[in-house]
Amino acid sequence: MSSDPGARERRPRPRFELPRPLSVTVRLTRFEPPQRRNFESALPRLPRTVEFLVETAAPIPARALSPVLYVGDVPVTEVVADDDTHYRFIAMQPASLRPGARVTLGWSGQPASDRVDTGASFVAPEGLWDDPAT
């Protein structure tokens, strides 16, 4: 005979709050898809695109959802962590970025109201709109 009433122990849910962005730097770059040993990347080679260098006050928590940088409502989803607080977001469709749009940080698939304002607005780096063939 057991004296356990069968109630489940409640554990606190993990908090996945995004850290406060300290800085956002925008620069012109080119993108080469990663070389994989067993398969070919579906990402295109971009001779000219925009890279956002984001520094945060703390590490972005690891979870099933990816962090996304939003330029207005345009998601910038390709991200590489340089270290615990420095991230590089690559715009795969730079033509969709609009100068003056607010830059926010959020989680993939989460509502806009949950995004963290970076305090930055998008300013296109010089040469972005030039013909890449020249």
Image (cartoon, rainbow, N blue to C red):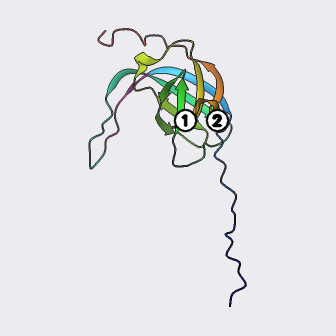
Pointers 1 and 2 in contact (CB under 8 A)? yes
The span picked out in magenta is: 29-35
The residue singled out by tag 2 in the image is 56
Q: Residues within 10 Å of mark 2 (few under 14, many from 20)?
A: some
Report helix, strand or loop for mark 1: strand
The amino acid beneath tag 2 is: Thr
The amino acid beneath tag 1 is: Tyr
Can you say whether 10 is above or below 16 in the image? below
Q: What is the number of callouts on the image?
A: 2
Residue 21 lies left or right of residue 53; in this view the side is right
Residue 133 lies left or right of residue 21; in this view the side is left
Name the quadrant containing residue 20. top right
Q: Residue at x 56, y 42 (%)?
A: 83
Name the quadrant containing residue 59. top right
Can you say whether 99 is above or below 26 in the image? above
Frontmost residue, 46 versus 12: 12
Numbered badge on residue 114: none
The residue singled out by tag 1 in the image is 87
Frontmost residue, 64 versus 42: 64
Q: Which of marks 1 and 2 is nearer the N terminus?
A: 2
User: Residues under labels 1 and 2: Cα distance?
Assistant: 8 Å
Q: Position of residue 114 (x, y in %)?
A: 63, 34
Q: Where is residue 69 in the image (x, y as percent from the top left)?
A: 54, 30
Q: Residue at x 51, y 49 (%)?
A: 64
- For the C terminus, the image quarter is top left
- For the N terminus, the image quarter is bottom right
Find out whether residue 110 is within the magenta segment. Answer: no
Report helix, strand or loop for mark 2: strand
Residue 91 lies left or right of residue 63; in this view the side is left
Name the quadrant containing residue 128. top left
